[in-house]
Image (cartoon, rainbow, N blue to C red):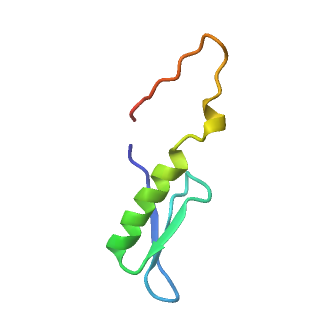
C-alpha cells in the first residue's frame, strides 16, 4: 500500500509527519528517518482493527487482505 505523507520541520526542532487520508494519524521524530519510522508504526496501528471491528454476523468469515 502506498500512502502520501506530509513531512514538516517542527518549530521546536525535528519533524512532524501526518497522513492526509488518515485523519488524526500524526507522528514526529528528531530526525527525518525517525519521523518516517514513527509514522509507519502509527499507520500500522491506525489500520489495525479493534476487537469491536471484528464482530460479524453468524455464518460470516473473517479473512485478511493484503493491499
User: Is residue 33 shown left or right of residue 48?
Assistant: left
In what quadrant of the picture does the C terminus appear?
top left
The residue at 38%/47% (across/down) is 2
Please tell me in which quadrant of the rendered image residue 31 appears.
bottom left
How many numbered markers are drawn? 0
In what quadrant of the picture does the N terminus appear?
top left
Near-viewer residue (61 or 15): 61
The residue at 35%/74% (across/down) is 32
Near-viewer residue (21 or 32): 32
Q: Residue 30: give x, y in percent of width and height.
A: 40, 81
* Vertical position of residue 52 compared to residue 42: above or below: above
Q: Which residue occupies the extreme left position in the image?
A: 33
Q: Which residue occupies the extreme top position in the image?
A: 59
Q: Residue 5: give x, y in percent of width and height.
A: 45, 60
Q: Residue 43: give x, y in percent of width and height.
A: 48, 53
The residue at 42%/65% (across/down) is 38
* Vertical position of residue 17 compared to residue 43: above or below: below
The residue at 43%/57% (across/down) is 41
Please tell me in which quadrant of the rendered image residue 65 appears.
top left
Amino acid at each position: 500500500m502506498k500512502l502520501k505523507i506530509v513531512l514538516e520541520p517542527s518549530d521546536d526542532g525535528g519533524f512532524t509527519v501526518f497522513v492526509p487520508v488518515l485523519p488524526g494519524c500524526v507522528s514526529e521524530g528528531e530526525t527525518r528517518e525517525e519521523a518516517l519510522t514513527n509514522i509507519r508504526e502509527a499507520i500500522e496501528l491506525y489500520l489495525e482493527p479493534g476487537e469491536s471491528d471484528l464482530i460479524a454476523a453468524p455464518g460470516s468469515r473473517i479473512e485478511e487482505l493484503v493491499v
